Image: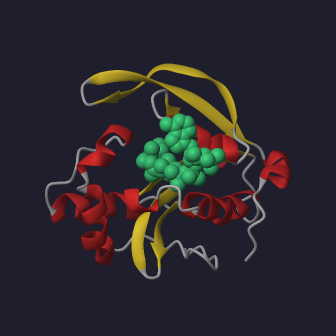
Amino acid sequence: MALRGPHIPPRPPRPEHTEALFALMSDPEMAPFVYWNPHQNHHETYQYLEKLQAKEGFFVIEVEGQPAGVIGLHLDWDNKLGETETWLGRAYWGSGLNTKSKVVLFDFAFGPWDLRRIQAIAHVHNPRSQRALEKLGFKREGLLRRWRWIRGEPWDFYMYSLLPEEWMSSRPPIYY
Ligand SMILES: CC(C)(COP(=O)(O)OP(=O)(O)OC[C@H]1O[C@@H](n2cnc3c(N)ncnc32)[C@H](O)[C@@H]1OP(=O)(O)O)[C@@H](O)C(=O)NCCC(=O)NCCS
């Protein structure tokens, strides 16, 4: 399935994305914010893309045909729930791309997919990620203690959620 918007066409992940995503995923400055270690070779990125292809709610974000990052929802259809996850190459931070991508994905999730809740977790030491969620109307629900094991250590995360009726008022005015 492909999601379409005028500013950012998110595409289903494809092997052809390997080279451009490797350039982003090998960036050592990304490491403190993501769960993977900087990729050392194209094969690691290819394997990452293979796993991504198996997930129906995940997309590569492209800017003028160039992969810029990944966005998705881990879908739990029984509970009409999606957990969102996004990363962008550093050059795109603060560019508005995160918001635009999420508008396309969430409109789809609360529209045709009829989800009743989108949730997100944010590392306690990642204020940028927390703020990016709060700007879109996500409410912080609580602290998940020792939620994820990252590089040999357990870390606390905040749990956030967004409901469809909240999205109606918090959605940024981006039209397509
Ligand atoms: C998380 C991510 C997708 C957000 O995209 P982004 O383009 O950086 O987000 P935005 O610019 O829309 O919003 C970030 C907000 O945090 C603010 N911010 C940045 N650094 C901050 C800090 N140290 N403390 C508090 N707020 C901060 C920005 O000013 C901005 O708020 P504003 O628009 O009100 O000024 C992107 O930063 C990213 O890919 N990070 C690495 C991966 C990651 O952390 N993913 C999330 C976990 S899954």
Q: Position of residue 104 (x, y in %)?
A: 65, 66
Evaluate whether residue 49 shows in this view.
Answer: yes
Q: Position of residue 156 (x, y in %)?
A: 46, 22
Q: Position of residue 65 (x, y in %)?
A: 43, 82
Residue at x 72% of width, y 63% of height: 107
Residue at x 75% of width, y 58% of height: 172
Residue at x 45% of width, y 58% of height: 55
50 relative position to 110: left or right: left
The quadrant of the rendering that contains the C terminus is bottom right
Q: Nearer the viewer, residue 59 or 98?
A: 98
Q: Position of residue 35 (x, y in %)?
A: 34, 40
Q: Nearer the viewer, residue 8 or 12?
A: 8
The quadrant of the rendering that contains the N terminus is bottom right
The quarter holding residue 131 reads top right
Residue at x 56% of width, y 58% of height: 98
- Depicted 125 relative to depicted 116: above or below: above
The quarter holding residue 91 reads bottom left
The quarter holding residue 16 reads bottom left
